[in-house]
Amino acid sequence: MSRHIVSNPGEFNLIASSLFTGHENLQHRKLVCLENASAHWLPSHNAEHIPGICVVPAQTIADRADRITHLLGQEYRVMVHELSEPLDAGLLAALAGTVQAGGVLLLVAPRTLNTASCANPDNVSHFGRRFYRLLDHHETLFPNAIHRCMAASANLQVSALTTALSLATPHAGEFSGALYQSAQREQDELLQQACHFLSDSEPGCITITGRRGRGKSTLLGKIAAWLTDQHRDYAVTAANSAALNSFHHSVKSPQRVVVDPHRIDTSAASVLLVDEAGNLPISLLEKLLSLHHHVIFCTTVEGYESAGRAFEIRFTAHIDTMNRRRLCLTPRVSWRWGADDPVEHFINAMVLSAAPDAQHQSAAATPIDISQHQYLPLSVRELSQSELAEDEITLRRVFHLLRKTHYQTTVQDLQHLVDGDGVRLWVLHAKQWPDILGVIVVSVEGCVDATLHSDIVNKRRRLQHQLLPQLLAQMANSPDALSQRYARVIRISIDTPYRQRGLGSMMLKTVESSLMNDSADLDVRAFGASFAADPISKAFWRSNHYDEFHVGHRLNPRTGLHSVAVIKSFNTTVSRVAQQAIRIHQDNQHWRDSANETQRFDDRHDEALLTQFANGQRSAQDTHAALSRLANRGLIHFPMSTTGSQRKRDNDLRQQVATFLETSQP
């Protein structure tokens, strides 16, 4: 495939000026990928002084989640983004969502990626190679909208290219009329439904959900304008002020805006409008719902934000349990760009946000009868990461199933699936049946360097992708099992029509057997998982003989539930350490549930835990029983109240325990 060669700004000006010429549909956006650019091409440049242009470097000290959240509600004519390896697909998808119709997304691929000189470069990840394959494919599909260019000179400056793009992009007035007409009709219909719903005196909840650029915040603003006309009091809140930009375009003078949703209380208006609600903790959403007569939650649910899909999967289910009236509004017509936008096609393909394919949907609509699955030729087979990344149909089916069933599945999970260290994946399907019935994703962990053991147990070091061995060692207060190898189940998903039939347990046993007999080099002898503590999940792991050894201290903001860690061991060393962790965990749970004053202080068991707690190497929750026994003897004051500052309570407790340990020494 031929490529534009760009050696000077003049040549790029010709490319930029050709983007919107002739009879080109101005409702669509353009994507230009400039490859082989010099290193550090963007970080030194600041384009904030050019209206409608945003330049986003690959590396920054800013938190990734904050960067994405800040983009919510923003709109630009030109977005310039420097690609990296590994590629941050979630950030790229969020950036693309800010580009207006008639705008340009300019991607800069540094020379270090070496994408042009080799079709399968060793220094590019599976996901990165997939990205460029998809870019090639979509360039063929949309030759007038997607362009790949080669930088033949290091003298190209970002300022010259952004200036050329800003001059080439049409102004909003040239395409707004045709673009907004169909979207306006849909919004008017949805607005009428919302107004009718809010006119009812019964308490209710409206959810406005949909893809990026569908005018959700604009619809929220129109509802606010109607409330003003009706002399109805309302308040507006969001995760941050940037998320309200589109809302402010529709409502010039909103009645009451509270940017910090934690400050909303019972004195707030009877109608509350919450924009980008998916970025707020579920516990906070539940509180807001209980405080107001009517609540309107507006959010994107595509899953490339840090929130994942907890709002769509978990919170909407919670609303239904409250027996509140609910109106679901889903704008489908694009507001920010035209229908069948080539850039949106490419981004959807990259992050797999659409349904797998027509054939898959048709098959899933008529599930096979597996009531006698023990007689059916069911197969559980492992897929390698390279096999998965290169088979787009299978990858779509696997990820689609994970998105349907797991609230935390994001684009980062997609990338980890095909590139994460130690990640293994198995799929379940029936013979001669195209659909995938189940998926298990496992992370192989452990074999931690002995020099790190002490720091891990004492919480001075935290290694990535070593959750199970680290948590077990810290809970048991023992480094003995850190040298063993573990398999942690990251995801286990069975498609809805096939649940409660034993397929999950059958898959799990197959994976356990496969890993234990894999090879002498792997030597997995312990399995575990960490999951949200809902009754169904706990019952599943218990029925498969996994023992609970830890419960998270705080509620997960995306589920409103505590996390639970479980383990199943086939190794003597791990079993011994696991039993110690389980005993401490059960001891803590016992004292939380019903403190037994007859139990006496056991210095053989408690002293080490109390010493760790006093040194800040163990939490109060994980030392609850030992602290309770001290308090029962009147040696410390252990407040049961959870009001006030947790840090202040813990610091006071640590000082008390440290004093006790010093005075109790012979």
Image (cartoon, rainbow, N blue to C red):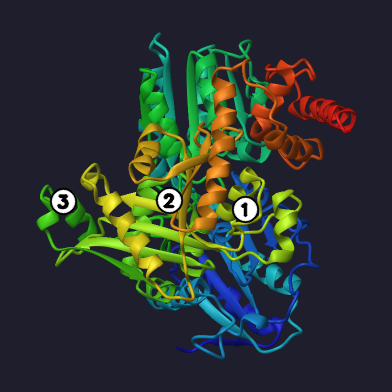
Q: Which residue is mark 1?
A: 470
Q: Amino acid at mark 2?
A: Ala
Q: Quadrant of the N terminus?
A: bottom left
Examine the image and state in which quarter residue 510 appears.
Answer: bottom left
- Pointers 1 and 2 in contact (C-beta within 8 Å): no
Q: Which circle's residue, 1 or 2, is located before the other in the chain?
A: 2
In this view, the mark in front (3 or 1) = 1
Query: In percent of the image, x 52 and y 74: which residue is there?
Result: 128
Pointer 1 local density, CA inside 10 Å: few below 14, some 14–19, many at least 20: many
Question: Residue 370 location, x and y as percent?
Answer: 13, 51
In the displayed structure, does residue 596 sit left or right of residue 430?
A: right
Task: Work out how far the residue at label 1 is from the one at label 2, CA to CA, in angstroms.
Answer: 58 Å
Query: In percent of the image, x 68 and y 33: which residue is there?
Result: 623
Q: Is residue 255 above or below residue 80?
A: above
Q: Which residue is mark 3?
A: 367
Q: Amino acid at mark 1?
A: Gln
Q: Is residue 96 above or below residue 112?
A: above
Question: Residue 96 location, x and y as percent?
Answer: 55, 58
In the displayed structure, does residue 530 sit left or right of residue 366?
A: right
Query: Closest to the observer: 337 or 210?
Result: 210
Q: Secondary structure at mark 3?
A: loop
Q: Is residue 521 above or below residue 547?
A: below
Q: Which residue is mark 2?
A: 178
